[in-house]
């Protein structure tokens, strides 16, 4: 089956769960006409269904090839990318001054989900280009912007992000790539980078690489890293392409999933040094790179959402068609579709509810980023920036974990056929597995949440969010709608657990950091489960007043299921945070025995 974007679900999540409508009414989006949101998503859905989704299986089976220093993508990939550029999809949220459409990042976030759902390997290319645009726009010189930004915004020249080296993965400060000053304002870069997504391909005539390297006089660690722009082909003053730069793919990885996305080893400077141009200031490359990484982390969370929704759609269709066994009370001679069985219903509802929660968390992150960039009031901008910083690790880690869990459930719904590649369920499972790893592992996201997002200002950002979520629970309880079941009570219990766990961690981040870090991952899960339950309840309340959604009761059912089956885990997760660290103190003796 092909993919169909769930437009109504996405609009409800974006406009009401994530707060886009409220932000537009408050004036934070200037003259943005929210009426066009649906039209953009519907057109994106058509492009994804017609162009990208049919290539998903092709890319998975064909993969990519490296010969004579050139990477060849799967059949149909270059044509699809040119159609992508021509349709303007790369420029959705780009600056109008450089040829972009100037639409909110939140709209692009919804589109990113659509690209990931239809063909995640294809969507990886524009994902990294968006991050490159943000870094160049924020930190690049006017000359570099003039030469490269318009091409990046249009997608005519995609971008890459090159951090990782054989000895420097998560520990970026250990990198050894070298940069030498030339004297004409450029630099010569040498080194080797690994795991570079779309490091080379045949879809465009140039690629703009963003590469971390160290100058000879650089201080050690991350404080001595600089960021450089290295084009695959040098660009002449008139904008035409010049000589081939000294940066080449010398290997490709054979991966568990995302087979159609080239993951390259890049050799830089074997023939005298690649010509590069400094982004930002010398030795301040990590600051520039984090601009790229934060955008990419949100996008990875959206990949998790997209894969989850695709897996759900496929599992639902299979469950409606596959006949096995009988519904309770039916005659023995009759076989029923497996969707009649309670356990299959449970799995499908869990898939949909978890996907919906992750979707809104990611969209809310994008809305916060938008307000931080677009609002006029400095105090509102600062508050939104703090909210975006808090939500980013949750969006990346929680949504990518959910992508894996939902894809696994999709295989389970298919039964033995899910383990067979022919159905396609296995591909979603394989493709999803990278998302908790790249752009900062989910363990690192959890550490970031506890040490950098919870700890500052006595947890002020967390308490503010808990207050808003508590107001939503008040509304659920005030609705007196019996169809919510115990949703209000379960959400109230979860908020109390989140508050207690947050306070416990705050007290130990400085005094007992190992104990705090041991609880970081279950704390992020606790946060996501509580936040997800509250945003789904908020959407369910809003759905009752929206025309065109069909039966709004389905959103109440979804919120209730999540609260009573997922959010209910919050109190157990709290105990894991506050009591589960003890055994880790002696873990080395056991693990190394």
Image: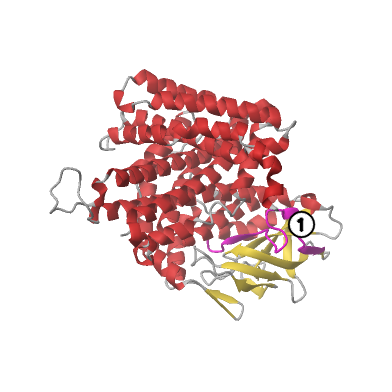
Whether residue 406 is situated above or below residue 273 in the rendered picture: above
Identify the residue at the far bottom of this view.
68
Q: Residue at x 52, y 59 (%)?
A: 124
Is residue 283 among what the camera can see? no
Identify the residue at the far front of this view.
593
Q: Nearer the viewer, residue 128 or 556?
A: 556
**Magenta-drawn segment:** 155-180
Mark 1 residue element: helix
Identify the residue at the far right of this view.
217
Q: Which residue position is annotated with label 1? A: 174
Whether residue 206 is situated above or below residue 24 in the rendered picture: below
**Left or right: 139, with 126 as reference point:** right
Q: Residue at x 73, y 69 (%)?
A: 274
* Most frequent secondary structure within the magenta stretch: loop
Q: Nearer the viewer, residue 89 or 201?
A: 201
Q: Residue at x 58, y 25 (%)?
A: 500
Q: Nearer the viewer, residue 376 or 117?
A: 117
Q: Quadrant of residue 38?
A: top left
The residue carrying pointer 1 sits among few (fewer than 14), some (14 to 19) or many (20 or more) residues within 10 Å by Cα, namely: some
Does the magenta run of residues contain 164?
yes
Find residue 545 and report its horizontal and vertical position in percent.
Answer: 31, 28
Q: Residue at x 26, y 48 (%)?
A: 339
Find residue 70 and report its horizontal and vertical position in percent.
Answer: 58, 76
Find residue 61 and report its horizontal and vertical position in percent.
Answer: 43, 71
Does the magenta run of residues contain 227?
no
**Left or right: 342, with 31 as reference point:** left
Whether residue 56 is situated above or below residue 472 in the rendered picture: below
Find residue 276 and report its horizontal and vertical position in percent.
Answer: 72, 64
Is residue 415 among what the camera can see? yes
């Amino acid at each position: 089956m092909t993919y169909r974007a769930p437009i109504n679900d996405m609009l409800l999540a974006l406009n009401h769960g994530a707060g886009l409508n409220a932000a537009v009414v408050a004036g934070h989006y200037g003259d943005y006409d929210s009426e066009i949101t649906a039209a953009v998503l519907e057109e994106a859905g058509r492009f994804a269904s017609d162009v990208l989704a049919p290539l998903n299986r092709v890319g998975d089976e064909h993969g990519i090839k490296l010969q004579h220093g050139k990477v060849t993508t799967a059949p149909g990939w270059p044509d699809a990318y040119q159609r992508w550029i021509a349709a303007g999809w790369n420029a959705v949220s780009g600056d109008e001054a450089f040829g972009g459409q100037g639409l909110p990042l939140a709209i692009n976030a919804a589109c990113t989900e659509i690209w990931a759902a239809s063909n995640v390997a294809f969507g990886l290319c524009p994902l990294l280009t968006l991050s490159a645009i943000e870094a160049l726009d924020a930190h690049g010189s006017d000359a570099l912007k003039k030469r490269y930004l318009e091409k990046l915004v249009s997608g005519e020249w995609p971008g890459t992000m090159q951090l990782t080296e054989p000895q420097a993965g998560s520990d970026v400060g250990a990198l050894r790539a070298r940069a030498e000053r030339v004297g004409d304002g450029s630099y010569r870069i040498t080194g080797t980078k690994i795991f570079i997504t779309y490091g080379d391909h045949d879809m465009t005539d140039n690629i703009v690489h963003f590469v971390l390297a160290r100058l000879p006089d650089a201080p050690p660690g991350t404080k001595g890293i600089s960021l450089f722009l290295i084009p695959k082909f040098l660009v002449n003053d008139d904008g035409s392409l010049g000589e081939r730069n000294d940066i080449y793919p010398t290997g490709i990885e054979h991966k568990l999933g995302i087979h159609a996305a080239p993951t390259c080893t890049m050799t830089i400077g074997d023939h005298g040094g690649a010509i590069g141009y400094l982004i930002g200031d010398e030795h301040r490359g990590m600051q520039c790179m984090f601009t790229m990484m934060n955008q990419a982390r949100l996008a990875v969370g959206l990949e998790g959402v997209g894969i989850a929704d695709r897996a759900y759609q496929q599992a639902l269709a299979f469950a409606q068609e596959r006949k096995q066994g009988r519904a309770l009370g039916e005659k023995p001679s009759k076989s029923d579709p497996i969707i009649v069985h309670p356990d299959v219903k449970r799995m499908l509802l869990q898939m949909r509810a978890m996907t919906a929660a992750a979707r809104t968390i990611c969209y809310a992150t994008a809305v916060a980023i938008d307000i931080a960039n677009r609002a006029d009031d400095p105090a509102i901008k600062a508050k939104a920036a703090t909210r975006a910083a808090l939500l980013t690790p949750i969006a990346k880690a929680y949504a990518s974990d959910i992508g894996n869990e939902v894809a696994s459930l999709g295989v389970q719904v298919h039964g033995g056929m899910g383990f067979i590649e022919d159905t396609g369920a296995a591909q979603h499972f394989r493709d999803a597995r990278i998302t908790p790893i790249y752009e900062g592992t989910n363990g690192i996201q959890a550490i970031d949440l506890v040490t950098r997002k919870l700890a500052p200002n006595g947890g002020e950002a967390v308490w503010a969010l808990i207050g808003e979520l508590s107001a939503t629970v008040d509304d659920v309880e005030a609705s007196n709608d019996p169809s919510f079941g115990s949703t209000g009570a379960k959400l109230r219990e979860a908020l109390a657990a989140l508050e207690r766990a947050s306070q416990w961690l705050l007290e130990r981040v400085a005094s007992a950091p190992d104990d705090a870090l041991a609880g970081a991952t279950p704390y992020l899960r606790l946060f996501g489960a509580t936040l997800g339950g509250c945003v789904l309840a908020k959407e369910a309340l809003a759905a009752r007043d929206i025309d065109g959604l069909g039966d709004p009761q389905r959103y109440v059912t979804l919120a209730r299921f999540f609260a009573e089956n997922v959010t209910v885990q919050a109190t157990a997760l709290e105990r894991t945070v506050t009591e589960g660290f003890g055994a880790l103190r002696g873990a080395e003796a056991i693990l190394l025995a």
